[in-house]
Amino acid sequence: MAHLDRPGIVELLDRLGAQDDATALGAARALHRKIGESGFTWNDALRAESAAAFGGSAGAAPTDATADDEPAAVDAAPPPDQAEAVRLLDRLLARKDISSTLREDLVALKRSMAEGSFDAMDARYVRALAKRLGA
């Protein structure tokens, strides 16, 4: 798979907010073309950046967030520590100062655990959120 020109993509994303409609439309078309030429789909590109930001995820297209010369190898993620995630989710849900939207998201994560679809990326998200909120 070809490499993802992250700096070029970020520059085009910045131009999407231009006041001039022609500039914004040109950036959108160039962005669409650049993703297509890279060999990635939008899903691949977004997963690749999520994987880089959160330490990798099985099945994600690997990239290196610091270098654009070639994709970095990402090892298969170990199974998430669900016991830790349950403790953190319970602590977060016990808080009175979280928004109803966040509460719904946390409940959905607990539901995904019960359904068996809770993965390593979900576990990393819960740990990061708990750390950020001091839970």
Image: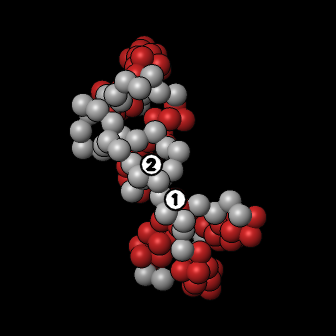
Element on which disc 2 rests: helix
Residues 36 and 18: in front is 36
Point 39% across, 31% down: residue:
13
Point 47% across, 53% down: residue:
76
Query: Closer to the N terminus: mark 2 or mark 1?
Result: 2
The three-letter code of the residue at mark 1 reads: Met
Q: Is residue 47 visible?
A: yes
Height in image: 88 above or below 114?
Answer: below
Point 40% across, 22% down: residue:
38
Quadrant housing the N terminus: top left
The spot of residue 128 in percent (x, y) is 44, 69
Residue 10 falls in which quadrant of the image?
top left
Point 68% across, 59% down: residue:
117
Residues 121 and 1: in front is 1
Pointers 2 and 1 in contact (C-beta within 8 Å): yes
Height in image: 99 above or below 34?
Answer: below
Residues 61 and 100: in front is 61
* Residue bearing the label numbered 1: 121
Residue 68 falls in which quadrant of the image?
top left
Element on which disc 1 rests: helix
Q: Would residue 45 appear left or right of 71 to someone viewing this image?
A: right
The spot of residue 74 in percent (x, y) is 39, 48
Question: Which mark is drawn over residue 63?
Answer: none
The three-letter code of the residue at mark 2 reads: Ser
Height in image: 18 above or below 133?
Answer: above
Residues 45 and 23: in front is 45
The spot of residue 135 in percent (x, y) is 48, 83
Q: Would residue 67 appear left or right of 4 to someone viewing this image?
A: left
Question: Which mark is drawn over residue 50?
Answer: 2
The spot of residue 47 in percent (x, y) is 49, 43
Query: How far apart are the alpha carbons under marks 2 and 1?
Result: 9 Å
Q: Residues within 10 Å of mark 2 (few under 14, many from 20)?
A: some
